[in-house]
Image (tube, rainbow, N blue to C red):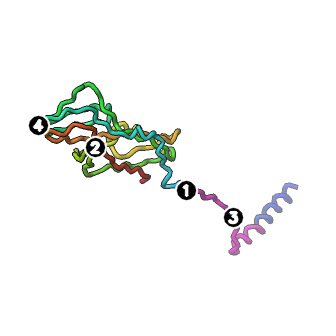
């Protein structure tokens, strides 16, 4: 009995091997899956109140000498330069704050004015200039023009600071103007 089983095993192997060696091949076709998610490039939404966007340098006293008032982004600290004085030096100004919502974990870029922007006296035509615009994103925590939407909430904020140039003997009054801010996905 042992001889018969051994003989059949060898004959079976001899029959299978020649068919594979005669140019016939076995093949297997498999499938994979490809996927992608497209997000809108305009998925950034401004969720802040309009009052948040006011860049307020506060009260400034002009003199016969021109000067500047710098409003920092970190703490809205006012720094005087030249011939101006700050009536209440410990009072902070108010940064413009922009609150955004976008696609969680994505990066966005901020564009601020490169040139000076005029502010005009209410009820008059006297002007001052605002320049040196800087931004500080909540996500980065330092001055810069790039932020990242929170990976969980999809939100981020940024503050804007700048430098106000006050002319010699600048006319007393309230000065206002508009500055553009653009936020976009790269």
Query: Does label 1 or label 4 sit earlier along the sequence?
Result: 1
Query: Does label 2 or label 3 sit earlier along the sequence?
Result: 3
Look at discs 3 and 1 and give the one toward the viewer: 1
Question: Dots 4 and 3: beta carbons under 8 Å?
Answer: no
Question: Dots 3 and 1: beta carbons under 8 Å?
Answer: no
Q: Quadrant of residue 16?
A: bottom right
Distance Cα–Cα, label 4 vs label 3: 89 Å
- The residue carrying mark 2 is 123
Q: Which mark is residue 64?
A: 4
Distance Cα–Cα, label 2 vs label 3: 83 Å
Look at discs 1 and 4 and give the one toward the viewer: 4
Q: Residue at x 23, y 41 (%)?
A: 164
Q: Residue at x 25, y 52 (%)?
A: 115
Asked if residue 87 is positioned above or below residue 19 in the image, the reply reads above
Distance Cα–Cα, label 2 vs label 1: 50 Å
Viewport quadrant of the C terminus: bottom left
Q: Nearer the viewer, residue 122 or 3?
A: 122
Look at discs 4 and 2 and give the one toward the viewer: 2
Residue at disc 3, secondary structure: loop
- The residue carrying mark 1 is 38
Does the magenta-highlighted stretch encompass residue 160? no
Question: What kind of secondary structure does the magenta stretch mostly adopt?
Answer: loop
Residue 118 left/right relative to 137: left
Question: How dense is the environment of label 2, judged by Cα within 10 Å: few (below 14), some, or many (20 and up)?
Answer: few
- The residue carrying mark 3 is 28
Magenta region: which residues?
15-38
Residue at disc 1, secondary structure: loop
Query: Does label 4 or label 3 sit earlier along the sequence?
Result: 3
Distance Cα–Cα, label 3 vs label 1: 33 Å
């Amino acid at each position: 009995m042992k001889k018969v089983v051994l003989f059949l095993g060898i004959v079976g192997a001899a029959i299978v091997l020649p068919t594979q060696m005669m140019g016939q091949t076995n093949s297997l076709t498999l499938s994979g899956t490809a996927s992608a998610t497209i997000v809108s490039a305009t998925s950034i939404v401004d969720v802040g109140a309009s009052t948040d966007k006011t860049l307020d340098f506060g009260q400034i006293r002009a003199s016969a000498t021109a000067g500047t008032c710098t409003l920092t982004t970190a703490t809205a600290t006012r720094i005087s330069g030249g011939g101006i004085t700050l009536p209440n030096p410990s009072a902070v100004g108010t940064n413009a704050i922009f609150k955004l919502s976008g696609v969680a974990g994505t990066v966005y870029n901020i564009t601020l004015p490169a040139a000076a922007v005029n502010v005009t006296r209410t009820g008059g035509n006297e002007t001052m200039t605002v320049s040196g615009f800087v931004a500080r994103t909540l996500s980065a925590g330092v001055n810069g023009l790039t932020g990242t939407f929170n990976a969980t909430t999809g939100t981020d904020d940024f503050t804007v600071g700048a430098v106000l140039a006050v002319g010699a003997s600048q006319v007393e009054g309230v000065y206002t103007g508009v500055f553009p801010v653009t936020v976009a996905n790269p």
